Image (tube, helix red, strand yellow):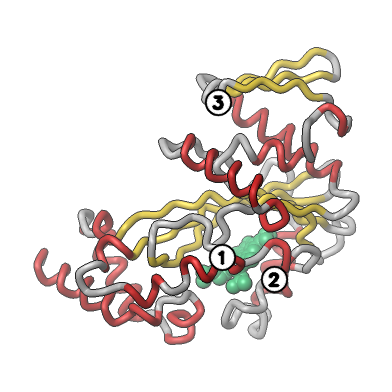
Amino acid sequence: MAIQITPEYHTEIAMKRALLRNHHERCFQSLDHTLEAQWEVVLLLTHQLAHYYPEHFSLNRQGNLYTFHNRLLNETQTFEPLNAASLPMEPLNWIGQHVQEDLLIMKQGDEHDEHVILAAGQLCFPGNWSLYFNLGMPFSRIHEPVPGLVDSGIADKIARFVSRIEAGQPWTRLNWSLNAGQRLDTSPETFDQWGHLRHLVSPDTVGTDIHLRVEEQNLFRLSGSNGLLFTIHTYLKPMMALMEVAAWRDRLHSVMKTLPQHLIEYKGIEPYYDKLLQYLEGYCDVQS
Ligand code: HEM
């Protein structure tokens, strides 16, 4: 299942809608000829929501017309797939405003083409990357800043794997990083609002300031338009909360202790790395 509804639903949907209203260009982009794929996303996600969360969502069909009801927001929308006039905005933008996930559409020339490019997206909670900048780029160009991924040939291997994902067999991965501050929108365009927080972390505030940021990412084949839907659900938890579970505490400690310098730099952890390590070590000593 792509979509997770969590207790933060109302807060995060309100944040997404405000970001889309105030910073539309940053949060929504689509290339020409992506409407068919966008409609596939609407059908995939409205069906999933109604199936997995029947207490919150319903989807009824009469001929070509579908009626989607979101009880959490008390909103109802009737739409006719492929009829642009039946929704108040582009289809990907509309369905993205009913889910907490960021949604990206990748396109392939045909099923033998190993080049997947970023063709459309609604991205409100990026982990320091820009949809506006990356739009139209192939998988390997997008991953160029990631240390070791492109030079080693791994990015091409992943792109090949991604290009062969089949309908009905979605693929999931988790990505992690750390944030100074409890902020979902860490876009490069707003770096001036959050970048400096990394330098303000003190030994006393490590537990409350630093958050583990986990992204649950899913990839689904959109078979009608030969595209892929990439969903990202972002979770933040402060260090303090992670210290309460021995397995999480120990794992974090061992990962941090052995994290290579180039990843410490890439993930933006360097300004507070030593303080974090001392915090984790102190905690492990106290608990053991
Ligand atoms: C197909 C859709 C995907 C898109 C649009 C995407 C996009 C991105 C972007 C924008 C970044 C940040 C790059 C930067 O620093 O500017 C990133 C990081 C990364 N991606 Fe992807 N990605 C996709 C799929 C995957 C897959 C399938 C894998 C691996 C199997 C992967 C592995 C990674 C890794 C390892 C990083 C570095 C993350 C970190 O250390 O924080 N990506 N991706």
Looking at the rendered structure, the secondary structure element under dot 2 is helix
Q: Which numbered disc flags the more N-terminal residue, 3 or 1?
A: 3
Ligand 1 within 8 Å of the CB at mark 2 = yes
The answer to whether 231 appears left or right of 254 in the picture is right
Count of marks placed on residues: 3
Residue 222 has which mark?
A: none
Question: For mark 1, what is the residue?
Answer: 190
The amino acid at mark 3 is Leu
Question: For mark 3, what is the residue?
Answer: 73
Q: Residue at x 24, y 58 (%)?
A: 240
Question: For mark 2, what is the residue?
Answer: 142
- Quadrant location, the N terminus: top right
Q: Position of residue 249 (x, y in %)?
A: 25, 63
State the CA–CA distance, disc 3 to disc 2.
Answer: 35 Å
Q: Nearer the viewer, residue 212 or 147?
A: 212
Q: Position of residue 210 (x, y in %)?
A: 34, 65
Q: Residue at x 81, y 18 (%)?
A: 65
Looking at the rendered structure, the secondary structure element under dot 1 is helix
Q: Which numbered disc flags the more N-terminal residue, 1 or 2?
A: 2
Residue contact between numbered discs 1 and 2, judged by CB atoms under 8 Å: no
Q: Nearer the viewer, residue 35 or 154?
A: 35
Q: Nearer the viewer, mark 3 or mark 2?
A: 3
Q: Nearer the viewer, mark 3 or mark 1?
A: 1
Quadrant where ligand 1 appears: bottom right
